[in-house]
Image (tube, rainbow, N blue to C red):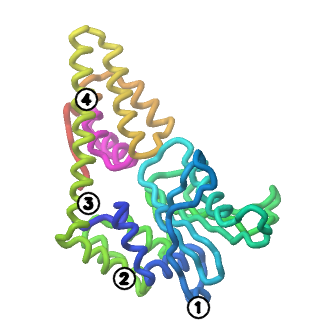
Amino acid sequence: MIISAKFDDVFKELFRNLVILRHFIGDILGIPQSKIRSVRLKNTFLWRRYRKEKLGILDVAVELNDDTDIDIELQVKVYDSWDKRQLFYLAKLFTGELAAGQDYSILKRCVGISILDFNLTERENYHTVYRLRDEEGNELSDILELHIVELKKTLTGKGEVDDWIRLFNARTEEDLKMIKTNNPGILAAIGELQRMSLRNPLRLRYEAYLKRVRDERAWKIHVWKTAMTEGMARGVAEGKAQGVAQAILDLLKECGEVSEKLETRILSEKDMDKLRCWLSLAAKSQSVDEFWEQISELPPNAKNSTKMHK
């Protein structure tokens, strides 16, 4: 196993390498490297004017040589109002350097790049660009632009963006070897991941993070199993099944968006053996898609199975 590029500290460490940063920005925004003369990392804390104003903290803040400001963020878990949060940060980046009395003409073009480890939409596109346009597609301005890269969707191409997604999703050395590219930025990122995967403080922090995730899931399983036992003691069979089904949904929603079809399937299940099996799978699954694949593969009479994809 290699250290994951989706681990927050690793993500930030990768983009401190300006070769990786230049090529990532160029590939996502479709800018030739010849047009990027320089990049400069900025302070990731967004300035606030008032004490009670919400502070913005970006994962990676970049300024190009043409004064374009770029915010690169990684979001692993889905939660409510993610879109509003992202727009808040982009707006904060846009207005942050305009002091009272200054002319609006000094405002810089701002671009947000959001890397999501969950599906934001049900569309097949895994790289989507949003800009200010009217209903007929006429552009008002390019001063604000948002790129969203969804890591969980099926890749359909062999371009540079596809290879960056493969890099972020890589879990093993074999996954890295499967990325066939001559892109200097991706090759540098592969080298950095291999280096960071050796025994060092960053690797130890990553392993501690994985242990914390496992411990949190183990605790949730304990809580729900206790609740099930208490429900059985009271003999409330129907309520018990609903409680376990809701526990499964709560665990899955931490991994991503649960479709209406899957939610209906879980809530309609009354077989307690099957629900116990699903509860265990939900606690161990890394994504909603992984859970869906596993319950689809289970035989109809499966009891307490814990089959997992390696």
Circle 2 — which element? helix
Task: Answer whether labels 4 and 3 touch (C-beta < 8 Å).
Answer: no
From the viewer's perspective, is the residue at label 4 or at label 1 nearer? 1
Disc with the residue nearer the chain's start (4 vs 3): 3
Q: Which mark is residue 206?
A: 3
From the viewer's perspective, is the residue at label 4 or at label 3 nearer? 3
The residue indicated by pointer 4 is 276
Residue found at x 57% / y 76%? 63
124 up-or-down from 84: above or below: below
Circle 1 — which element? helix
Amino acid identity at mark 3: Tyr
Marks 4 and 1, how far apart at CA:
57 Å
At which x and y percent is residue 165? 44, 68
User: Is 128 positioned to the left or the right of 221 in the image?
Assistant: right
- Give the residues in magenta: 277-301
User: Is 140 positioned to the left or the right of 271 in the image?
Assistant: right
Marks 2 and 3, how far apart at CA:
20 Å
Instruction: Residue lying at the far bottom in this picture: please name it.
Output: 34
Disc with the residue nearer the chain's start (4 vs 2): 2
Amino acid identity at mark 2: Ala
Pick the residue in front: 305 or 109: 109
Tell me if residue 291 is in the magenta stretch.
Answer: yes
Residue 4: name its quadrant: bottom left
The residue indicated by pointer 1 is 34
The residue indicated by pointer 2 is 188
Tell me if residue 201 is in the magenta stretch.
Answer: no
At which x and y percent is residue 86? 58, 54
Marks 1 and 3, how far apart at CA:
36 Å
